[in-house]
Image (tube, rainbow, N blue to C red):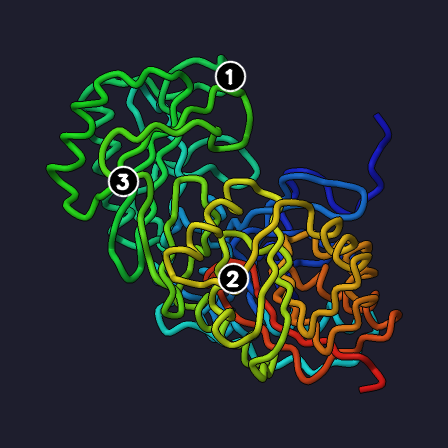
Amino acid sequence: MAKINAPVYKNQEIEGEVVDITYQGMGVVKVDEYPIFVVDAIPGEEVLVGVTKVQKNYAFGRVIKRLKESDLRNHEVNQAALTTGIAPLANLVYPAQLEFKQKQVQELFKKMHLDAEILPTIGMEQHTGYRNKAQVPVREIHGEINTGFYRRNSHNLVPIEDYYIQDPAIDHAIVVVRDLLRKYQLDAYDEQTHRGDIKTIMVRRGYYSHEMMIVIVTRRKKLPVAEALVAGIRAVLPEVTSIIQNVNSEATNVMMGDTNKTLWGADYITDTLLGKTFEIGPLSFYQVNPQSTELLYQLAIDKADLRGDETVIDAYSGIGTISLTVANQVKQVMGVEIVPGAVADAKRNAKINGVENVTFELGKAEEKMQEWQMAELQPDVIFVDPPRKGLAPELIDAAVAMKPDKIVYISCNPATLARDAELLATQGYAIKGPVQPIDQFPQTTHVECVVVFEPKEA
């Protein structure tokens, strides 16, 4: 093995000042410009660091002792939220989190030489307990079933009852199901041997409806004592309207399989978003923070500056949230989505809401956009809300060729947003107005942005 030429070595103890924070929420201590990434260390602190792992260009460390504490440190957080990475920014007071996210976007745009004003991040009044969905692994620890979350960079489960960023009613439901699994002595899944039955507990709760769905993910089709589990859940959790078994027989990191069996109640729960009703199944993609999602989508719609006679494309349309929200303000909406179940959900949600000027098609966004371009479709506005990998170059090519008045980009990854902004700029579409970061996932390093692109000649 080649020797690593670094200014530090494993198990070395070093005193240093935390000078920055990474996109993963780790503090940065430097030795001769060589960075050491340290969990639970924030800028302005002086720490005694124990080096835990050394690479060629960086190292990892842990805080042995805090020699000087930052005024920005938040003490009102469960340590497990930091240990597991559930809430990697929770050690920062909330205003500092918002500044960190604004700075993150600024630096990425500066790196791409993009001239844009990055506004202060819009935060949330309730920035803990906001998640309306939980997926928690079930594992055996010392002979007892436990629920929790994995320690950072490992598959070692840390037992947790208070998840800090999840709806407290969901946290309570997880404990109820866990205790029932213990009571009936069911077997937790073992990743090493691929044995055991219970893999994951998923809970969804409507923010407005308060309807709750419990999903028990199993390795095998047979769920022992299913009737007793249903009775136990219903006896303690009156909000529950749907109890489902999901079968995931694969030895994979993917949490849920394709097969669902409704054990009791409905196949879905309902909730509302910007006045529209949505049915949400166990596999439906639905934003986990509906409060900030309403703000995010409303901002995107406002920035589109709609007149009422537009043809709109909603790329990455999911279960139809943006399409159905904007439909009553435009002439027609055309959505495209790659997940068959999401397209079916979107069509059903359109019927539920009586929306008739929307069509949803199945396919890759970039391929459908190319097809629409070849058919000489001329949309006035294109909404894009891509996954973290951003837009495919083919989609950008097709979108630009259609010559829309506006491309409204809702981003969940400022790095790919900046990259795509540069690509759009080379094809004649410039950023119009400021970039607005929104904190849709408080206590984490994620940041959403809304930005509008218009033809440069406009």
> Given the image, on which type of amino acid does mark 1 rest?
Gln
Q: Horizontal and vertical percent for residue 280?
A: 38, 48
Q: Residue furthest left?
A: 235
Question: In this rendering, is residue 173 above or below 263?
Answer: below
- Viewer-proximal residue among 336 and 38: 336
Q: Horizontal and vertical percent for residue 330?
A: 55, 75
The label number, if any, that marks residue 192 in the structure image: 1
* SS type, badge 1: loop
The residue under the point 59% across, 83% down is 305
Lateral position of residue 435 relative to residue 294, left or right: right
- Viewer-proximal residue among 368 and 142: 368
Q: CA distance from mark 3 to mark 2?
A: 55 Å
Q: Horizontal and vertical percent for residue 81?
A: 42, 50
* SS type, badge 3: loop
Q: Earlier in the sequence, mark 1 or mark 3?
A: 1
Position of the C terminus by quadrant: bottom right
Residue tagged 2: 67
Q: Contact, CB < 8 Å: mark 1 with mark 2?
A: no
* SS type, badge 2: strand
Sort mark 2 into few (<14), some (14-19) or many (20+) by Cα contacts within 10 Å. few
Q: CA distance from mark 1 to mark 3?
A: 35 Å
Residue tagged 3: 266
Q: Earlier in the sequence, mark 1 or mark 2?
A: 2
